[in-house]
Image (tube, helix red, strand yellow):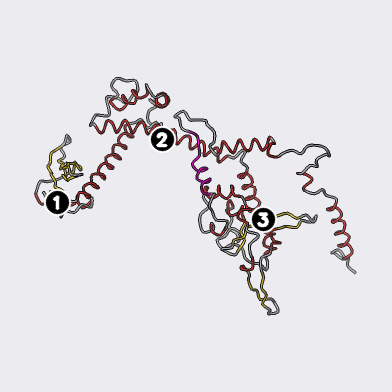
Amino acid sequence: MSKRSYPSGAEKKKKAAHQKEAIGKLPKLTAFFTPETPAGSKKIDPSNSPLQQDTEKTSELISGSGNDEHRDGTTPTTDLIKQVQDLTENISQDPGDYCDAVFTEQVREIWIRKGPAFFQNKDCDFSEASRTYTEFDGRIKTRNLHKTVFIRRLKNNESVERKWLLYSPLKRSVFCYSCCLFSASKTSFNSLSGCNDWKHINNLILEHENSLAHRQSMMTYIARSKIIGRVDVDLLSQYKTEVDYWKSVLKRIVAVIKFLASRGLAFRGDNETFGSQNNGNYLGCMELLSEFDPFLADHIKKYGNLGKGNTSYLSANICNEFIDIMGKKVLMTIVSELKTAKYYSISVDSTPDLSHIDQLTFIVRYVKDGVPVERFIQFLPIKEHKAEYLAETVLRLLENYGVSIKDCRG
């Protein structure tokens, strides 16, 4: 007779009893986190604890409530954090409303600030999400979601709340809070429709919360939810500081370019070196402003003569780009005024430039606020002076700007 290779029933019962006895001797989880308070001693107020005070101070710094200022006089605040604080006031508690959209950093920030309890909806009426199943014997049975799925029973008979499990009245399904936010692996718990197989829901939930993808997403959520040591907020604050700095630089540069361009003055000189007497009107104006503006003086000292390949926004290329942008803006304003006035007249004439390219000067006249005005539109390169060719050139220009030739009166 061969020896039995599997344990008998008595051996199984003995092993289960031994395991139950060993588990019963284990300390409860609360013993590690809630120390007993000795009789007669004062209870510690958590709101006055050093950890809570540090958390509040950190929250103030993140929310931009500090009074520290940048060197250009602006306050270091994070636009994303402000937008999130405004959006968290009136948002949907149904996780199904977010499944069809992309989880951007802004949406993640809102979910993290609200926490999983805000989206859990475990007190809803689950009868609306009931489903019918056909059993093996042909009977049709209706199954619902129960509140018991939101609690996990451990082997030592402790109950742990599944805070990550969310119910959507809209989708009539359940979702995973952390996986919807951070998991790259697609499962039924972070899909568009969610999980609603109530017949096998206990096994599906147990399998999901023991999966590697769920554990990784939970670790990511825990790390992101801690205000102290938040890396992304520090990066956003640093990014905002850099943006504010370069915006302040560009404001001064645009003001100088606008001043010189509006008066038709030359920009460039013999060189582009700060401190030179022949560096032109543009750099000369920047040096003049820096005498009364410590921020601009510090910027010129740091980035002034670094040469090509270094970001400074002080080069001739930046001047040309801003002049082009301003020119297009002025042209669109003239065209808008011309369309408002409706009736107009035109004046065209051609002349060669220094490179011996024949150009057609295009000028329009119209009435603005009861006063006749004359505006230059642009130079048009032309190849010949025949009347038909010039007429086609004029009509093509008016058509490009959406101006009707029927309103031309001269």
- Which image quadrant is residue 316 in? top left
Q: Position of residue 190 (x, y in %)?
A: 59, 58
The boundaries of the magenta stretch are 75-87
Residue at position x 53%, y 38% from top? 235
For residue 299, the mark is none
Q: Mark 3, residues whose alpha carbon is within 10 Å: few (<14), some, or many (≥20)?
A: few
Residue at position x 83%, y 37% from top? 40
Give the amino acid type for the residue marked by disc 2 in the picture. Answer: Lys
In the picture of the structure, the residue carrying the numbered disc 2 is 247
Q: Mark 2, residues whose alpha carbon is within 10 Å: few (<14), some, or many (≥20)?
A: few
Residue at position x 57%, y 50% from top? 111
- The Cα–Cα distance between marks 2 and 1, rounded to whole angstroms, is 43 Å
User: Are the residues flagged by discs 2 and 1 in contact, CB closer than 8 Å?
Assistant: no
- The Cα–Cα distance between marks 3 and 2, rounded to whole angstroms, is 47 Å
Give the amino acid type for the residue marked by disc 1 in the picture. Answer: Cys
Q: Is residue 290 left or right of residue 405?
A: right
- The Cα–Cα distance between marks 1 and 3, rounded to whole angstroms, is 75 Å
Give the amino acid type for the residue marked by disc 3 in the picture. Answer: Ser
For residue 211, the mark is 3
Q: Secondary structure at mark 2?
A: helix
Q: Nearer the viewer, residue 293 or 358?
A: 293
Q: Is residue 33 left or right of residue 59?
A: right
Q: Position of residue 322 (x, y in %)?
A: 31, 37
In the picture of the structure, the residue carrying the numbered disc 1 is 408
Is 79 colored magenta in this rendering?
Answer: yes
Q: Position of residue 289 (x, y in %)?
A: 35, 25
Residue at position x 66%, y 65% from top? 145
Q: How many labels, in total?
A: 3
Marked residue nearer the N-terminal end (3 or 2): 3
